[in-house]
Image (cartoon, helix red, strand yellow):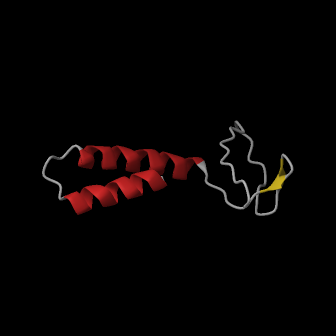
Amino acid sequence: MNNIYTYEVDHGNESPSVGAGTEINGGKVTAISFTAQLNDNDKAREIIEDMLDNDFLERATFDKLIDIQNLI
């Protein structure tokens, strides 16, 4: 089984070229998320947390929201 790590790197004002196969610390990049996606994930987490605070959610809906929250 491969060990896969998630990195968040601040390149400041630079925009280095990064793509599949780029080597980092002896491994190769297989996926990339940029700041916009990370910000969208944070907003999605906030929306889900607000929805989970609703006392009138059906159990199945609550469980699905938890599943989605665990993915982002």
Of 71 and 41, which appears nearest the observer?
71
Above or below, 42 relative to 68: above
Q: Position of residue 10 (x, y in %)?
A: 68, 38
Q: Position of residue 33 (x, y in %)?
A: 61, 54
Of 16 and 62, which appears nearest the observer?
62
- Lateral position of residue 24 relative to residue 61, left or right: right
When asked about the image quadrant of residue 7, the answer is top right
Residue ID at (76%, 63%): 20
When asked about the image quadrant of residue 27, the answer is bottom right
When asked about the image quadrant of residue 9, the answer is top right
Q: Position of residue 64 (x, y in %)?
A: 32, 60
Of 49 and 44, which appears nearest the observer?
49
Where the N terminus falls, by quadrant? bottom right
- Lateral position of residue 51 relative to residue 56, left or right: right
Total residue callouts: 0
Q: Position of residue 51 (x, y in %)?
A: 25, 49
- Lateral position of residue 42 relative to residue 62, left or right: right
Residue ID at (65%, 48%): 6
Residue ID at (81%, 62%): 21
Report the residue that reaches farthest toward the left. 56
Residue ID at (70%, 36%): 12
